[in-house]
Amino acid sequence: MKRSWILPALLTLGCSLSANAAIDRNDVPSCTSSLPQELVNHSNERELFIVLDRTMAHSLHDNMKSEMYQQIKRFLEPGDAVQMVQFSSFYNDGYTNIAFQGKTDLPLAPEQRNHVRKSQLAKLDKCLKKQSVFFVNKIGQTLKDSFVAQETPTNTELIGTLSDIASQIVANSSAKRKVVLLVSDMLENSDITSFYGNGRIRTIDPQKELALVSQKSMFTDFANADIYIIGTGVLPGGQSYVSTQKMKQLQTFWQGYFQQSNAKLLGMGRPMLLSQMK
């Protein structure tokens, strides 16, 4: 991705990589930092958390990755914030980290535009268009980087990782609406419980598994977030999937898990979402 034509236009408005008022970090240069701040709408209405299990690089075909990117692009609106969180096993660089965090500016309201010079408005409008392109390209590049295959992919501790991400990242967001796109096979394999048995995916009893999570105090707080999932049940290599019966039990378990973790599961792709995130 060539950024040379984007950044100068952004910088002409005196922008910097410092955050907007609503967030601590912003990897997207601002278009409004040189404007009188009383004219700028800094509200944080929506934040999208793209949570990526990096072991899925071995499971998702390129067309699946492309459709996921298109889902994200169709979802985004001006003023949205996005955080991209990578996780995996603890092998090498498999630790959980925020790979990207950014927010775009909202256009000025018509009544506010009357207080800005025409020349500055022209620069602002041009900057906002290029900021949008920069935003989606940066998300696309981070997705691509996230799906670089790991040398030694291993099963991940999903429930424990989700607990950390929910409590330390999602719940700390000031956004009025929080949406989580979780990219994972959703196959837990940890000391809490394992959905594997004798080297295969087993048919779980959702209520017994939820009881185990409760006993280990591993339900968390997603702060009333809406959850969408891509990748459920797809196995390494992407050539096979969990059976219909096993998938049904998986869905029942995760619906219960998110309900007891203050979240709403709105879409569970098996492996892809069949409707658009909203």
Image (cartoon, helix red, strand yellow):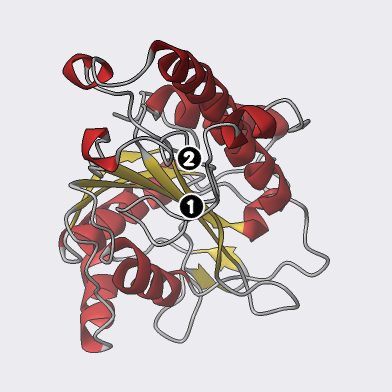
Q: Which residue is mark 1?
A: 26
Residue 118 position, x and y percent, is: 40, 11
For the residue pair 267 and 20, the one nearer the viewer reads as 20
Mark on residue 8?
none
What residue lies at 24% left-to-right and 50% top-to-bottom?
Answer: 175
Question: Considering only vertical position in the picture, is 142 above or below 224?
Answer: above
Task: Judge whether residue 193 can be spotted in this image.
Answer: yes
Mark 2 neighbour class, 10 Å CA radius: few under 14, some 14 to 19, many 20 or more = many
Q: Position of residue 195 (x, y in %)?
A: 46, 68
Q: Which residue is mark 2?
A: 30
**Residue ID at (25%, 73%):** 220
Q: Nearer the viewer, residue 235 or 152?
A: 152
Quadrant (top left, top right, bottom left, bottom right) of the N terminus: top right
- Label 2: element kind: loop
Residue 109 lies in quadrant = top left
- Under mark 1, the amino acid is Asn
Q: Is residue 243 left or right of residue 137?
A: left
Helix, strand or loop under label 1:
loop
Name above or below for residue 208 compared with residue 21. below
User: As rendered, which of 185 and 166 lies closer to the eye?
Assistant: 166
Pointer 2 with pointer 1, Cβ within 8 A: yes
Image quarter hosting the C terminus = top left
Q: Is residue 70 visible?
A: no
